[in-house]
Amino acid sequence: MSISPNERSGEPGIFLMRRHGWFQRAAMGVPKKPTTGDRGPVRDALLDVIDAAGGLEFSRGELLRVIGIAQEEYSSLLPGVASSVPHYPAVPHLWGGATVPAVYYAFFETATWTRAVIDRFEKPLCLAVQPHDQLFWNSLQRIRSVSGGKVFDDARTLAGVSLHRYSPPYAGCGAKVVDRKLIYPVVDTVPVLNAVGDQADFRNYLKFNEGRHAEMLVEEYWKAVYIFIDKVLDEFYPK
C-alpha cells in the first residue's frame, strides 16, 4: 500500500519535518523586526503562516499517497483494461477508476493550503508589521513576489473556484493514461462562469495546452512555499 512521504518506514505516525523546524525557529525566540511595537502579535502571526505551510506539507504527502493508491488500482486491473481498449497502449485514453475523484479532492486541498499561506501573510502578519515598519513590510512583499508570485496567484485562483463554484477541470474528470501511468490534467486557465455567459457551458472554454497536471503543480506550490517561509523567517530571525 502506498504511503505518504511524511511517514517513516517502520515507524508509527506522521512527521511534518519542515513544519517542525519552522515552528521551533519561530516559537523559541522573539522576532528581531520590526524594531518598534509589540512583537508578540508578530510572532503569533508568523506561527499562523507556518501552520498553513504545514497544512500544505501534510496535504502534499496525502496527495502523493492517494496518487500511489490510484496507480496501484489501475495496475491491478491493467490486464482487463488492455484487452478492452482498442489499440492499447498506443493511444492515450482516460481512466475513471474509483480512486480518481479522491486524487482531485486531495489536489485541491493543496491549492487551498497554498492560498492560506498567502492569505495569512497578507492579513494577520501585515497588520502586525506594516503599521510599525512600512519599508520592512515592502521588503517582505518583494520576497513573496520573488519566491512564487505567479505560482501563488495560480493556487489562489484554483482554490477560490473549487471552493465557491466547481472543481476544475470539471466534476467527473478522469485521469489521462500515458505509458501506463495515470496523469491528472489541470486546466491552463480557469474560466469564470459569469464571464462565459452560459454557466452550463463553461467546459467549452477549458484549455489543456500547457500540459499541467496535479503532481507537477503541487511540487511547484510546495517549492514556492518552503522557499518563501525560509526567506521570511530569515528576515525575522537572522542566523
Image (tube, helix red, strand yellow):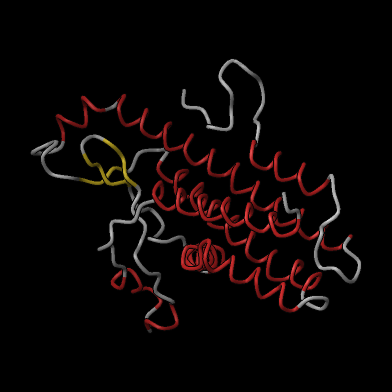
Q: Residue at the front extreme?
A: 239
Q: Residue at the left extreme?
A: 87
Give how far across and how far down residue 77 sits, in percent.
Answer: 28, 27
Query: Going by the image, does 164 lie left or right of 87?
Result: right
**89 up-or-down from 76: above or below:** below
- Quarter holding residue 18: top right
Query: Going by the image, does 69 lie left or right of 10?
Result: left
Give how far across and how far down residue 12 sits, in percent.
Answer: 66, 20
| Residue 156 vs residue 93, the one in the foreground | 156
Give how far across and how far down residue 147 sits, in percent.
Answer: 53, 61
Q: Residue at the right extreme?
A: 38
| Residue 78 vs residue 239, the one in the foreground | 239
User: Which residue corresponds to the image point at 87% horizontal and 63% vertical from the top-left?
Assistant: 39
Q: Residue at the top extreme?
A: 10
**38 up-or-down from 219: above or below:** below
| Residue 114 vs residue 34, the one in the foreground | 34
| Residue 121 vs residue 203, the one in the foreground | 121
**23 up-or-down from 71: above or below:** below
Give how far across and how far down residue 11 sits, in percent.
Answer: 63, 18
**88 up-or-down from 108: above or below:** above
User: Which residue corresponds to the image point at 62% horizontal and 71% vertical from the top-left?
Assistant: 141
Query: Going by the image, does 25 lie left or right of 30?
Result: left
Q: How many marks?
A: 0
User: Which residue corresponds to the image point at 66% horizontal and 66% vertical from the top-left?
Assistant: 119
